[in-house]
Image (cartoon, rainbow, N blue to C red):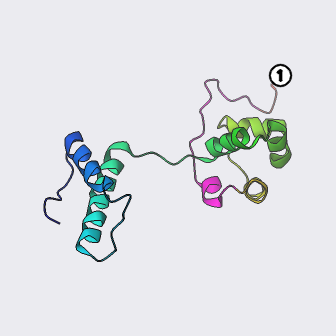
Amino acid sequence: MTDIRPIRNEDDYTRALAEIERYFDDEPEPGTPEGDRFDLLALVIGDYEQKHWAVEPADAPDVVAARIEDTGANRKDLVRLLGSKSRASEFLNRRRYLTMEQVRALHAEWHIPLEVLVKPYELRKDDKPARSSRQNTA
């Protein structure tokens, strides 16, 4: 287990990848010296990747859009689940959150994990001021 150290730059990262690669075809037994070396290399590589290339998990609008694209579903299917064309559009364009009823429908029918559907995401801010629902009748 000697010579395993923190990864501080791309050269260290490349070296660590080369070291761990030799274990991919013949993974060592856990608890052995080679198994411990494998685990430590995986830890330092994972730590470096998380710090330098962390990928934010996709949010509900992205996951639903990907599901439509990947499964051959279409917007009409989404409209049916969300209740109206405008609701589907507002959701996909990040102008509206899902209701709990919509979350349940997407989870039940499209098997999207609940934690993805209920995770908060940022709504798009309009460039125009909001219109009042009351008309000026003066």
For the residue pair 119 and 128, the one nearer the viewer reads as 119
Residue at 70% from the left image edge and 38% from the top image edge = 69
**Can you say which quadrant of the picture contains the N terminus?**
bottom left
Q: Label 1, on which residue?
A: 138
Q: Is residue 126 above or below residue 1?
A: above
Q: Is residue 127 magenta?
A: yes
**Can you say which quadrant of the picture contains the C terminus?**
top right
Q: What secondary structure characterizes most of the magenta part?
A: loop
Q: Which amino acid type is marked by label 1?
A: Ala
Q: Is residue 29 above or below residue 70?
A: below
Residue at 25% from the left image edge and 44% from the top image edge = 14
Tell me: 13 left or right of 64: left
Q: Give the SS element for disc 1.
A: loop
Could you classify mark 1 by the number of other residues whose Cα lies within 10 Å: few (under 14), some (14-19), or many (20 or more)?
A: few
Residue 77: x %, y % from top left: 83, 43
Q: Is residue 23 above or below residue 67?
A: below
Residue 99: x %, y % from top left: 73, 53
Q: Is residue 13 above or below residue 26?
A: above
Magenta extent: 112-132
Residue at 79% from the left image edge and 43% from the top image edge = 78
On the question of residue 96 being in view, the answer is no
Q: Is residue 81 magenta?
A: no
Most extreme residue toward the front is 26
